[in-house]
Amino acid sequence: MERQVTTSVQSELAIPAASHDEPRRRPRRAVEEQPDRGILSAADRRRPHVRIGGAVLNVLLGVCLVVVGLLPLLWLLKSAVTPTQDTLAHPLALFPGGIAWSNVTRAWNDVQIGNYFFNTIWMAAGEWAVQLLVATTGGFALSVLKPRYGKLISGMVLATLFVPAVVLLVPLYLTVLHPPLIGHSLINTFWAVWLPAGASAFNVLLVMRFFDSLPKEVFEAAKTDGAGTFRLFWSVVLPMSKPIIGVVSVFAITAAWADFLWPNLVLKDIGIQPLSVRLPQIQSSTDLGVYLAALAIATLIPVVIFLIFQRTFLRGGGLGGAVKG
Amino acid sequence: MSVHTSVRQQGRVASARVQRRHNPITWVQRGGLTTLVFLLPLLIIFGVFSWTPIVEAVVMSFQKTNLVTAPVFVGWDNFVAVFRDPVFWIAVRNTGYFAALALIFGYPIPLVAAVLMSEVKRMKGFYSVLAYLPVVIPPVVSVLLWKIFYDASPNGVFNSILGWVGIPPQPWIQDAATAMASLVLEATWAGAGGTIIIYLAALTSVSPDLYDAAEVDGASIWGKIWHVTMPQLRGILFITLILQIIATAQVFLQPFLFTGGGPVNSTTTILLLIYQYAFTQSLGGAYGEATALSLMLAVFLAVLSIVYFRITARWSDK
């Protein structure tokens, strides 16, 4: 659900298009041999006032980016281990009264952030598994097996991209409250977040595009060697699909970590709530230093994932930032 | 089975012939059942959690639904009720205000930043990471963190910084006059990185030959930006503009977590109102009104996008 708030359905559509165009353009070795240039030419860069102006702008840009992009995060990390009174009295001072590591342990144990942390991991893991199952099997059936009714189904999947998620909010809530065939409510179970997460048209289309680009000869060769459909899927297509599975996984996990509106609706039981749902509720009853430590803990995993998988985020993912929910 | 499948893929003629002898046994032999097994997760998940709810949303918007009695069709009553709700008009105005402010703050900044960043060859990777960091912080954490930054006391983080340059403390989210702008500021901070990355990607695809050609014609640096870079980015600029409008029309997290719609409804947005119709104590259970309003929003955005793309397509032709 949350994905709608920060981005739109249509932006999800734009991602495969953007990332698809890129490999096509990449064989530009000729360009790489040329001096890599942008707006400024080598001659421009030699002119003194351009050089000085450029250097000033460069420093200014760097300072702005550090202040805007990095400082809030560093402030959070600093304040997470600063005694509450110091943060209240001198929010911008650097450890005027020493360091309070106890904030972190108190947050983890007393406020049970550890518990919510593992809930978040469990929620993200389940969403990841369901999304991957739906996207890979569905993408395989639609792109590789190509049944006659496949066009209709991929069309119906595509169409859901154009429906803002808020339209689904109430009916989806009632579906989870009274799911078909099961007979009891999914509210307060992880299934209530895991299963709807699988209905991500963005993932299916991304995987389908990738499968479409795989060489057909390999499938034919596997079939001539006697591989059945399951074998083809498990031993040929999936191993070839590591890049796209990586992309879907990274987005699935960060999106699950970011999701708020939907888990807030369906996970009412405090014992199974993820961090995003719990953090706003504990604000008023928690000591500020401990609370900031809790916020820092909640930020850790997504930032680490981002730093490890920078390329995934910054290449395909510029648009994906807010993708999920 | 595999032989039959490959025969089918050999061309329309062959498949048409096979289709004519279509019965359940040949269908299973040709792998139809296996295909269906692979499609099953997608069909079940999309069927239950996407396609059915979309249809239900349309049906529910014409029904009076509560969880006790069977739903009753009430025609356009839900839509009329929404239009008669004074808060609806406040929410429309607030959402429009949010979108407008977000455009003023949020639209030019990523473009300027991306153009500058793309010229800094050596630091580009590092700068991109810096610009994107706010995007990867979980949105809830960002809002809660900024809520602390927005502390209205003179000792608040932002008010301390303002104090350095002699500006008196601001009330930020606690005053109806400044609340919405404060929300937009945080949303812009949280979202700009994504747009910057889009522009950076678009900038790398601008052919260097165009700049070379412009220089042969004697273009200055500004001339190159204005006559080469901007026209080359025009397509993506059009897209990010409408995407931003669509996204801001659905803003929920900021008003929900920062202010809960207050002070005095000054930050109630359309999505917040939908949520309140359906799920909060005072209004709760008005599922019909909630779905009616969400459908109106969806139709409005769809029409807006179509009109927008018609108009920009005409501009792009010139």
Image (cartoon, rainbow, N blue to C red):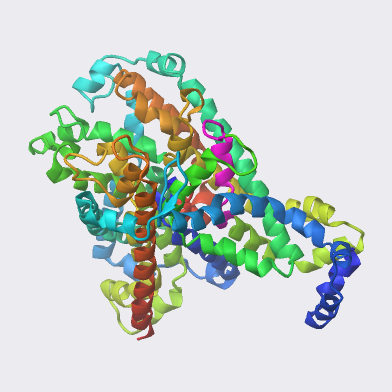
Q: In which image quadrant can residue B272 be found? A: top left
Residue A315 appearing in the image? no
Residue at figure coordinates x 31%, y 54% from the top left? A58
Residue B37, given in percent of the width and then of the height, sits at 76, 53
**A297 sits left or right of A209 in the view:** left
Image label count: 0
Residue B180: give x, y in percent of width and height: 20, 47
Residue A124 placement: quadrant: top right
Q: Give A35 or A122, whichever is nearer the viewer.
A: A122
A230, B228: nearer the viewer: A230
Residue at 62 percent of width and 49 percent of height: B45
Q: Nearer the viewer, residue A155 or B111?
A: A155
- The residue positioned 16% from the left and 32% from the top of the image is B152
Magenta segment: does it hold A148?
no
Residue range of the region highlighted in magenta in the rendering = A185-203
**Direction from residue A221 to residue B305 in the image, left or right:** left
Vertical relation: B252 (above or below) B121: above
Can you say whether B285 is above or below A243 in the image? above
Is residue B211 at least partly visible in the picture?
yes
Residue B134 horizontal/vertical position (percent):
38, 43
Drawn side of residue A13 relative to residue B42, left or right: left
User: Residue A46, position in %: x, y?
Assistant: 33, 66
